[in-house]
Image: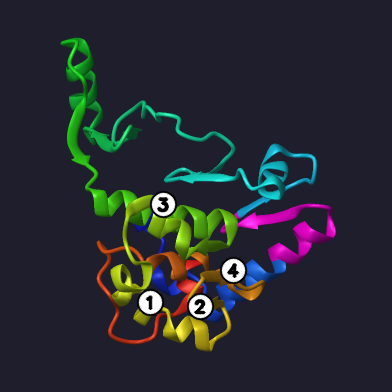
Amino acid sequence: HQKLISIDDLPESDEKLSLFANATETFLEHGYEYIGMDHFAKPQDELCVARANGTLQRNFQGYSTKEGCDLIGMGMSAISHAGNSFAQNVKSLPEYYEKLNTYTLPIVAGLAMSQDDIIREYVIKHLMCDLRIDKSVVNESFNIDFDTYFSTSIDALDDLVSDEFLINTPQAIEITETGRFFLRNIAMCFDKYLEKPSTKPVFSKTI
């Protein structure tokens, strides 16, 4: 259905950024708190409580208060995450029903996470949830030297540091108040599966 929408009818990057800023202001004026990315919640909501006490979690579906839970995807193309593995269901409805009718798991693809995947998942999750990553904790948890291991990622952060979206010190990486609106861009620097852009990214495209 989205393909029926003409690209020319969609807002430009600056307009999208303005729309998001207006929406954020409206939510805040009505008593919501900004959790991160596109999540807002009232102060008594469990997401706000988790953020305040440092137990906020994130998975590929969004922010959560549940840590270490296996996610089982139901339906065609759904994605499951169990332990350190991912699996995706078949993408067409006839094939999905065919698998179920023959008592076969409707899985078409899977991925076993490497140790590098696990380390990067840890860093990205804590940056998105805690807005901070303590380099010494990562070093002790995974027996690495953070700045050496993530040297390419740290180089990719230079523009974000210049724009005052984050602060990078020998001890930690801390996301600023403005940087909270650009968590995706910050996280992308630690994602080895993304093609690194040759030019400075347009931030509003990832909000």
Question: What is the spatial separation of the Cα atoms under label 3 and label 2, in whole angstroms?
Answer: 18 Å
| 98 relative position to 183: left or right | left
Magenta region includes residue 26: yes
Q: Amino acid at mark 3?
A: Tyr
**Residue at which label 4 appears:** 181
* Corner quadrant of residue 27: bottom right
Q: Who comes first in sequence, dot 1 or dot 2?
A: 1
**Helix or strand or loop: what does disc 2 sit on?**
strand
Mark 1: amino acid = Ile
Question: Which residue corresponds to the image point at 36% horizontal and 73% vertical from the top-left?
Answer: 147
Mark 2 neighbour class, 10 Å CA radius: few under 14, some 14 to 19, many 20 or more: some
Q: Are there few (<14), some (14-19), or many (20+) residues within 10 Å of tag 1?
A: some
Percent position (x, y) of residue 171?
51, 71
Marks 1 & 2, CB-CB < 8 Å contact: yes
Pointer 4: residues within 10 angstroms few (<14), some, or many (20+)? many
* Alpha carbon separation for disc pair 1 and 2: 8 Å
Q: CA distance from mark 3 to mark 1?
A: 16 Å
In contact (CB < 8 Å): disc 2 and disc 4: no
- The part of the chain drawn in magenta is 23-38
Which of the labelled discs sits on residue 171, or is there none?
none
| Mark 2: amino acid | Asn
The kind of residue tagged 4 is: Phe
Which SS class for mark 3? helix
